[in-house]
């Protein structure tokens, strides 16, 4: 018995049998994704925000001139009670992280839709001017960029190792009706023991590059596809 009656030109019976078996697995995966998302939403309140960090921010428009100002984490919620903060990292020598760049390439187009339901910001410990320069290079016109330099945010919320090297991580915060702010969730798959053949894939579900390549016979391959990043990644820290 087949799952549906749609067929593609010239498909062999063996293909349809294997495809139906895969379709059953895809249905089960969809259910599992929904179940995990419900479990994530149902988390009890996490720890209270350690402090209302004072980030450095410039004009929202990347091409606009204007002074750097101080913006508190609490102000990033806007009209919402949920806030997503993606911590972008720079590698040794000040080069932007290719993974963070790929994630933000994808998120940039959905910022308006995300901000319909939650606050969203990108924070890096690097000087704000460096991140804004790279954002202009990548045409990231929509996210809100801030610098956490001068604060302990990165160390407190695990965007930094004890040796001061930076880490990518997504953190989600929740504001209660009394105005208090608590941590809700972080991409902690980054920290669990590695499994054989598995990358940490801590933000896998929101990273379209790899999900699209998973649809191909070749799969994800090794490393980033050629030409993913321009040569300017080599000079952005200059």
Image: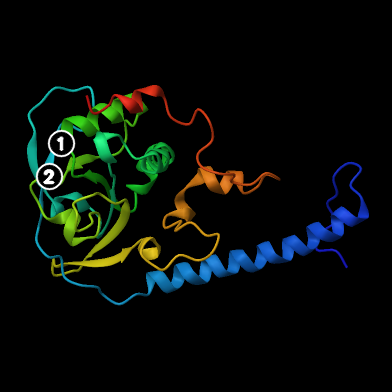
Task: Choose top left, top right, bottom left or bottom right for residue 44.
Answer: bottom left
Residue in view at x 32 percent, y 65 percent: 185
Residue in view at x 85 percent, y 45 percent: 8
| Distance of label 2 from label 1 (alpha carbons) | 7 Å
Q: Quadrant of the N terminus?
A: bottom right
Residue in view at x 18 percent, y 23 percent: 64
Dots 2, 1 in contact, CB < 8 A: yes
Residue 25 lies, in percent from the top left, at 69, 65
Nearest to the observer: residue 163 or residue 33: 163
- Left or right: 51 in relation to 29: left
Task: Choose top left, top right, bottom left or bottom right for residue 22.
Answer: bottom right
In the rendered image, is residue 61 in sight? Answer: no
Residue in view at x 48 percent, y 70 percent: 36
- Left or right: 203 in relation to 60: right
In the rendered image, is residue 40 in sight? Answer: yes
Note whether 195 is above or below 133 in the view shown: below
Residue 54 lies, in percent from the top left, at 8, 49
Residue 157 lies, in percent from the top left, at 22, 60
Who comes first in sequence, dot 2 or dot 1? 1
The residue carrying pointer 2 sits among few (fewer than 14), some (14 to 19) or many (20 or more) residues within 10 Å by Cα, namely: some
The residue carrying pointer 1 sits among few (fewer than 14), some (14 to 19) or many (20 or more) residues within 10 Å by Cα, namely: some
Snapshot colouring: rainbow
- Which residue lies under the disc numbered 1? 127
SS at badge 2? loop
Q: Which dot marks residue 149?
A: 2
Residue lying furthest bottom in this view? 44
Q: Quadrant of the C terminus?
A: top left
- Left or right: 149 in relation to 23: left
SS at badge 1? loop
Residue 110 lies, in percent from the top left, at 41, 41
Task: Choose top left, top right, bottom left or bottom right for residue 42.
Answer: bottom left
């Amino acid at each position: 018995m087949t799952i549906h009656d749609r067929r593609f030109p010239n498909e062999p019976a063996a293909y349809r049998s294997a495809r139906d078996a895969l379709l059953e697995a895809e249905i089960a995966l969809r259910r599992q994704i929904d179940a995990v998302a419900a479990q994530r939403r149902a988390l009890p309140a996490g720890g209270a925000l350690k402090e209302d960090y004072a980030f450095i921010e410039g004009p929202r428009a990347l091409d606009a001139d204007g002074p750097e100002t101080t913006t508190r984490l609490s102000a990033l919620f806007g009209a919402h009670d949920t806030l997503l903060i993606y911590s972008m990292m720079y590698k040794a020598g000040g080069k932007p992280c290719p993974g963070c760049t790929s994630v933000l390439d994808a998120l940039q187009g959905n910022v308006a839709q995300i901000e319909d339901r939650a606050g969203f910001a990108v924070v890096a410990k690097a000087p704000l001017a460096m991140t804004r320069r790279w954002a202009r290079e990548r045409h990231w016109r929509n996210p809100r960029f801030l610098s956490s330099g001068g604060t302990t945010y990165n160390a407190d919320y695990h965007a930094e190792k004890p040796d001061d090297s930076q880490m990518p991580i997504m953190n989600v915060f929740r504001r209660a009706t009394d105005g208090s702010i608590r941590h809700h969730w972080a991409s902690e798959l980054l920290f669990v023991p590695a499994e054989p053949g598995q990358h940490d894939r801590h933000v896998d579900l929101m990273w379209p590059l790899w999900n699209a390549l998973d649809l191909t016979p070749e799969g994800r391959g090794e490393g980033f596809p050629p030409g993913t990043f321009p040569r300017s990644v080599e000079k952005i820290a200059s």
